[in-house]
Amino acid sequence: MKIWNTVFIVLIILLSIFTWIYGGKALLIRREWSTGIKKLQKQIDSNKDKLKSVLEGVDSGKPRESFHEFSEMSVGELINKLDVMAEDRGNAWFGCKPLSVDENNIVSVPPRQLGDDNPSTPDNELKPLQLITISVEIISPVDNENPDLVIPPEKLGGVFYVFDEGNNANAGAFLGRFTINEPPMKKEKNYAVTLKSATELKGDEINFIKSKMKSTWAIYSTMPRDRYDDIFDRIKKEDIDRIVPEEEMRKNLTKADRNLTDFDVVLTAGYLRNVKLNQRKELFLKNIADLKISIAQMSKETKDVQFAIELENKRIALMKDQINAVQKVLDGYNVVIERIKESIIKTQQQNDWYAAKIADYNLKSLQIIEQKAESAAKNIE
């Protein structure tokens, strides 16, 4: 019995130790839970304050009529401000997905009446224009009550300004002015529209649009306005640093006294410059084509001249051969003439000798005759 009592006592002691250890841990866990609950309660209260500040504005002590930044506005104020900005901006569709490009749409400029008494331009004199058509899928804006439902773009019609929205790697870009003459077609949850270029696009412009087909586009019914008031004056510095990462652009946008840009005027001026540049380019290309024709003609004439020169060189060589042959004949004649001269000289010398002899014989004959005559005369006497 003493042994079993000792065993029970040891077990009771061990159980007491384990109970004391686990009781301490339970108390520690309970204390941590209590501390965590208090922290979470503080976070809940803080989040309630944040939610209230978002719904009612962060600075509840600031008068409602004073100037508020966007971060200080309540949800209602932000909605009203957004409605005013959207109304001022006009209709716009963002996140549009380009599907395909058709650049084989060739049209002719319609006849224009030049005046009351002037006829319209004949059809055969109309300049063909290359206009492209692009199919685009509209996926925004969506219904606030049903985010999966796209609002029907019923106001699509007329001339629109299309922009590439860009991404983190590439900045956005203006793609051109397009017309939408057909109502949008329902495509599952979204809508498909066909854009037709409002102006003629050149090859490099078409290639630029093709390079942006993997991006998303924005379609504006009116050009966006450049504004400082109620936009950049209501954004905190840390927010503008995040929204506009480029420092030079950020400095320009946040200047209160900067000159605002009328993008419609800028684009129109840029379009006119582009038209003039294209006209100059076409003129240069025409001049280059004319120069190529002139160069080809000059090359042909040069070949003709070279052929004539080669022919004349052959004639000159032949004439030189003839001259050499004639010179040889002349040299032969000169040899014969020299021989004749020598013969004539010899003959002349012989004739001179014969003449001298004849003169000498004549002189001697005269002397003999005179002597004979004198002797005859003497005999007669």
Image (spheres, rainbow, N blue to C red):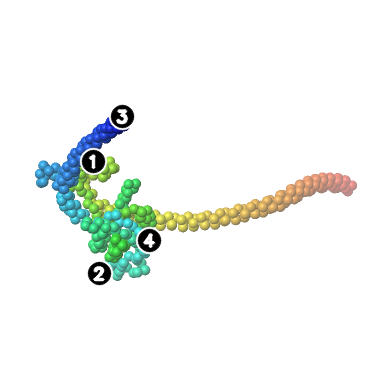
Tell me the kind of residue under disc 2: Asp
User: From the viewer's perspective, is the residue at label 3 or at label 4 nearer?
Assistant: 3
| Dot placed on the residue nearer the N-terminal end, 1 or 2 | 2
Q: Nearer the viewer, residue 278 or 237?
A: 237
User: From the viewer's perspective, is the residue at label 4 or at label 1 nearer?
Assistant: 1
Q: CA distance from mark 2 to mark 4?
A: 37 Å
Numbered tag placed on residue 238 in the rendering: 1
Q: Nearer the viewer, residue 331 or 113?
A: 113
User: From the viewer's perspective, is the residue at label 1 or at label 2 nearer?
Assistant: 1
Residue at figure coordinates x 29%, y 42% from the top left:
246
- For label 3, the residue is 2
Residue at figure coordinates x 39%, y 54% from the top left:
284
**Mark 3: few, some, or many residues within 10 Å (few <14, many ≥20)?**
few
- For label 2, the residue is 116
Tell me the kind of residue under disc 4: Glu
Q: CA distance from mark 4 to mark 1?
A: 45 Å
Q: CA distance from mark 1 to mark 3?
A: 81 Å
User: Where on the picture, by quarter, is residue 250?
Assistant: top left
